[in-house]
Amino acid sequence: MIETMLLIMDDRRLQTIEQIRQFPGGNHEVEFKPLSGEERYQWVESVLRRFRYPQLRRQEKGLIRQYMVKVTGYSRAQISRLIGQYNRDGELKRRDYRRHRFAGKYTRMDMELLAKTDEFHDYLSGPATRKILEREYRIYGHEEFRNLSEISVAHLYNLRKKNGRLDLGKLFTKTRPVISRIGERAKPDPKGIPGHIRIDTVHQGDFEGLKGLYHINAVDEVTQWEVIASVERISEAYLVSILAAMLPEFPFVIRGFHSDNGSEFVNYEVGAMLNRLLVRFTRSKPRHSNDNGLVESKNGAVIRKHLGYSHIPQRYAQEFNAYYDKFLNPYINFLRPCFFPVIVVDPKGKVKKKYPLEEVMTPYDKLKSLPGAEECLVPGITFARLDAIVAQMSDNEFAKRMVKARSDLFERISRPMNGDSESEACGFIHLSTLSTKKETIIMTPFGADCRQKVASA
């Protein structure tokens, strides 16, 4: 049987059914030749024609089938398919195998647009990137994003599999816990009202015993509105002035201030400032590491992802504040989508959080969607003014400018500094503060009304 699968034979001397019946007993009248797939089809067709297969009786057809199965090595089902093809078409032709392939929906241009979007936004999560692609087409009318605007989150990950990330070395120092009675040990409950911010510090690495600058990250718990600033050190002399500059950059009234137990926030100077502003000061409870989880996640997802872990000297704090004021803070609040949970209680009473795609939106969009949102705004701030900021350019256009500004900033600070004159030549408008013991001058993107209010406080 194995030999007949490798050989084809010259059986032209077999002309009768009786000779076919005697074939298993001997094959002295058969001459075998090398086999190929096309030749086997031709041989099966020649046998069907020679014996006039359609005109044979049922028993004779069975003998022919057995004969072809034995010689060709084909299964009985395959021989039946060949006979059916011969009866239908009058001939046998070998068909080339073609693997079925689904039509490709996303072109190379779509993949290039996705790659550029990922590069501009530092590879956000799938739902956040999906929301940006949708906004590029539906809000800003960019026709080249029509196809990508309907992509599923799962297939988005399939398209970006070839895009890898570099793992950067992590160098940081942990905040030392202190025992203090300043502030209330409690987890704040905003009850869906914006203005309850979570705050934390991020250290930008050490280098040869020198400390890097510190980032101050403040995030609203309800809207995830985020304000970032940098300071040279985290002592009270620096923190009070930078916090006085950061709080007015939130467009809504601040009602709560929650931090961990680090001494940079838990001190009398910060407590006195919050008391003057009538802001409730709370801090994390012992053995509750997730009390400040929101801002901790933003530290990694925004600051570390955007700036990395490398050492940045302290003297560049003002330059980074100018960059945050002009680019990073507007980007993360007006253009960068975030996840917002939906609380679901199952029949057993277990509370679960789900993150549907419909709830992926920017902090500004979340602020606008809240009931009574206009009543929470700081006097002098309106949604019309904030909408004008969003309408200036699309997500990708702004992100492209931000990436360029970030590259220029890192290139500039990587050069050796020769004194204050070269620092002033950088051309930045300083955001944070120019402070003295008696007066604090604050610059924010929301106008003079906010500056006057905080300066008077």
Image (spheres, rainbow, N blue to C red):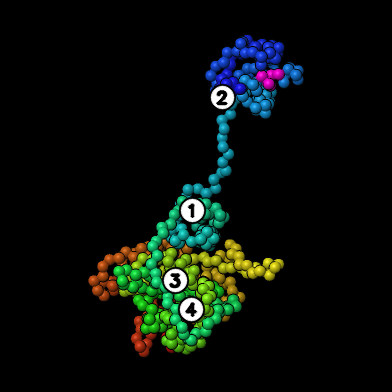
Work out whether mark 1 precedes mark 2 in sequence or the reverse, and give the earlier one: 2
The tag on residue 259 is 4
In which quadrant is the N terminus drawn? Answer: top right
Instruction: Inspect the image, locate mark 4, and give the three-letter code of the amino acid beneath it.
Output: Ser
Q: Which residue occupies the foreground of this view, 138 or 235?
A: 235
Which residue is labeled 3 in the image? Answer: 329
- Crowding at label 2, few (<14), some or many (≥20) Cα neighbours within 10 Å? few
| Disc 2 to disc 4, C-alpha distance | 77 Å
Residue 74, image x, y percentages: 63, 26
Magenta residues (range): 63-67
Work out whether mark 1 precedes mark 4 in sequence or the reverse, and give the earlier one: 1
Q: Residue at x 55, y 21 (%)?
A: 35
Looking at the rendered structure, the secondary structure element under dot 2 is helix
Instruction: Inspect the image, locate mark 2, and give the three-letter code of the amino acid beneath it.
Output: Gly
Looking at the rendered structure, the secondary structure element under dot 3 is helix
- Crowding at label 3, few (<14), some or many (≥20) Cα neighbours within 10 Å? some
Q: Is residue 82 above or below residue 158?
A: above
